[in-house]
Image (cartoon, helix red, strand yellow):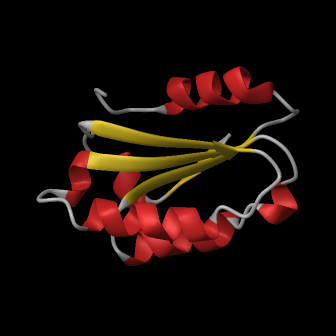
Amino acid sequence: MMQETPARAGARPLLSVLVPTFDRDVRPLAAELLDDIAALEDPLSAELLVLVDGNPALAGQEEVLAMAAARALAAGFALAPRNLGRSGARNAGIREARGEF
């Protein structure tokens, strides 16, 4: 199930940035990607989606969503119910994506 920031509930973005991850802390990468999204001419034209395929304790879910919410950016975070593998995690993220691209 996808947890998301309030900004993600709005209009459909142009771009979805998908980060499938396995057993790693995504906070540093998510912070960098959120900086890049915030620097866009229209920051709400993009959303960041993180799909954790592995140990949720390492993911930093609350921190990533808080970083995005503090900037009013669209972000979603999902924990896979089981290990889906690379393609399975990517495909699950694509199903959750709302962007045109």
Residue 61 found in image quarter: bottom right
- Residue 86 vertical placement versus 68 (above, below): above
Q: Is residue 41 left or right of residue 71?
A: left
Q: In this view, does 34 lie to the left or right of 46?
A: right
Q: Which residue lies furthest to the left in this view?
A: 41
Q: Is residue 100 left or right of residue 23?
A: left
Which quarter of the rendering shows the N terminus? top right
Rendering coords of residue 62 (x, y %):
66, 69
Q: Residue at x 11, y 59 (%)?
A: 41
Q: Residue furthest bottom?
A: 70
Residue shown at the point (80%, 27%) measured from the top left: 85
Quadrant of residue 26 in the image?
Answer: bottom right
Image quadrant of residue 57?
bottom right
Q: Position of residue 47 (x, y in %)?
A: 37, 48
53 or 2: nearer the eye? 53
Asked if 63 appears above or below 53 in the picture, the reply is below
For the point 88% across and 33% down, which residue is it?
82
Identity of the residue drawn at 41% across and 78% down: 70
Give the quarter of the figure containing the C terminus: top left
